[in-house]
Image (cartoon, grey):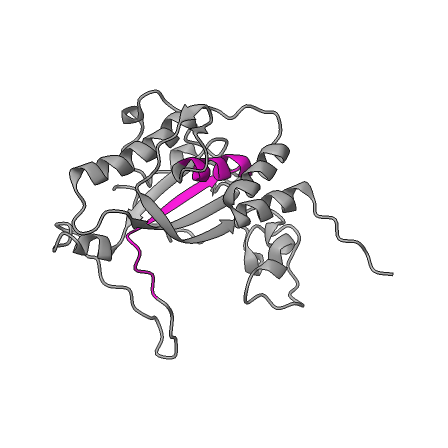
Amino acid sequence: MSRRYEPTRRQFLKAAVAAGGASALSACLDLGGDDPVPTGVEDPAELERRQHAWRDVLETDEQGNPKLPRHHAFLYLELDADGEPSAADRRGVESALSVLDRAYERSPAGLVHSIAYSRPYFERYGREPAGVDLPPPRRLSSFETPELDTQDALLQLTSDRAEVLTEAEAALFGDRETANGVEAVDVPATVDDRRTGFIGRGMPADRADQVDGIPADADLPDASKLFMGFNAGFAGNQASESY
């Protein structure tokens, strides 16, 4: 007799984040719980200007190590404007992202986000930013034949709450009129590719069958936060928070 598979609430929410879209948002809102989502600031200018400086807003474990939020979405964007981006184009992106800062507290309980621009984006200007080395993407080994990413920008959305992440994404791309009660502004870009990630105790074991490259007979500890049994990311593997 075969055992019927019944996904847990946590597994269902993770699957919804991976799927994305309006149906995923509806599912996340239904299962997200009744706790109110903490709101952001009235004026985004009050926030830390270093967008990659996450350490101060993250929780820590018993050893004092920062704990990343549980759910992650990586949106590879192509900006709608052709040629060199204008001041209006840049203000459009800023306005859309400022909605997130007003709608959600910058924390794992709310939403933490960042955006990075690629070499192809800066090539529209005919020059790279002064003092910044942006080498073109390349394969790491002679036997690899990867499809290199050349989109304009990469937007990362991350939260402990799946419904927050899916709502924020929907608000950015015209699928929702508000984000946590704040009127949404469409970001002037299209999503060329969407990828998701996760970190948390038991999540690798739960999702091993959904990830390419993990052997079917892999013995993943139930308590591991990352694949290969690691409990935390490698120290010193992140870029400086100075930018």
Residue sitting at x 21%, y 57%: 134
| The image quarter in which residue 124 lies | bottom left
The one nearer the camera, 118 or 56, is 118
**Visible in this render: residue 164?**
yes
Tell me if residue 233 is in the magenta stretch: no
**Residue 71 in picture, x, y percent from top left:** 51, 44
How many marks on residues?
0
**Relative side of 109 to 76, left or right:** right
**Residue 109 in picture, x, y percent from top left:** 50, 31
Residue sitting at x 39%, y 45%: 156
- Residue 145 lies, with reference to residue 5, above or below; the image says below
The residue range painted magenta reads: 148-171
**Residue 106 in picture, x, y percent from top left:** 41, 31
**Visible in this render: residue 64?**
no
**Residue 27 in picture, x, y percent from top left:** 60, 39
The one nearer the camera, 177 or 203, is 177
The one nearer the camera, 37 or 243, is 37
Residue sitting at x 17%, y 52%: 83
- Residue 221 lies, with reference to residue 42, above or below; the image says below
Quadrant for the C terminus in the image: top left
- Residue 225 lies, with reference to residue 107, above or below; the image says below
Task: In the displayed orientation, state which residue is furthest to the top.
Answer: 42
**Relative side of 138 to 216, left or right:** left
Task: In the displayed orientation, state which residue is furthest to the bottom.
Answer: 143
Quadrant for the N terminus in the image: bottom right
| The image quarter in which residue 47 lies | top left
The one nearer the camera, 168 or 175, is 175
Tell me if residue 165 is in the magenta stretch: yes
